[in-house]
Amino acid sequence: MIRPLEYCVNKQHIHVSVETIDSRIVELLALRKTYIDKGKSLDEEQVEEQQLIRNINSNYAVLATKFNLPMEFIQSIFQEIENYINQEFIAKGYEQQ
């Protein structure tokens, strides 16, 4: 459970809230990967895919600003996510050959 910060009166409250947040982050990353995999399986034109990638990259700046986080930090997180997904996608491609 994520306890509202103003109701966290001891370290245990903070610890449980952070653990819940971490769990949700991983859950959302797995869900994001599912959507990316589905998108890769659909037949789309290359031009549309490149436009989508540009839109996603510009969205990182919007997200960073919205949540008052450094843009480089947000970009690096999503770059690592994309590297992971692309490596797994490439590995599956080699396995299927």
Image (spheres, grey):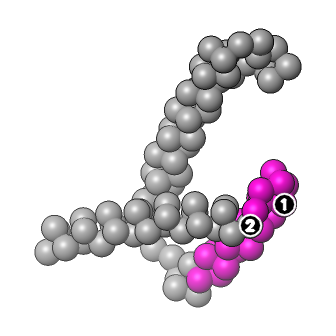
Crowd band around label 2 with a 10 angstrom C-alpha radius: few (<14), some (14–19), many (20+)? some
* Amino acid at the residue labelled 2: Met
In which quarter of the view is residue 73 placed? bottom right
Q: In the rendering, which numbered label is found on residue 71? A: 2
Q: Return the x and y of residue 91 as percentages of the image width and height.
A: 25, 68
* Residue 87, magenta (yes or no): no
Residue 11 located left or right of residue 41: right
Q: Give the quarter of the figure containing the C terminus.
A: bottom left
Prevailing secondary structure class for the magenta stretch in the rendered image = helix
Foreground of the two, 55 or 64:
64
* Amino acid at the residue labelled 1: Thr
Q: Which residues fall within the magenta stretch?
A: 50-70
Q: Give the quarter of the figure containing the N terminus.
A: top right
Q: Residue at x 62, y 29 (%)?
A: 18
Foreground of the two, 68 or 81:
68
The reply to whether dot 1 and dot 2 touch (C-beta < 8 Å) is yes
Helix, strand, or loop for circle 1? helix
Q: In the rendering, which numbered label is found on residue 75? A: none
According to the image, label 1 marks what residue? 65
Which residue is farthest bottom? 47
Residue 5 located left or right of residue 16: right
User: On screen, 83 above or below 36?
Assistant: below
Q: Is residue 24 visible?
A: yes
Q: Return the x and y of residue 51 as percentages of the image width and height.
A: 65, 81
Residue 35 located left or right of residue 48: left
Q: Alpha carbon of mark 1 to alpha carbon of mark 2: how far?
A: 7 Å
Helix, strand, or loop for circle 2? helix
In which quarter of the view is residue 92 placed? bottom left
Q: Return the x and y of residue 86 as percentages of the image width and height.
A: 39, 69
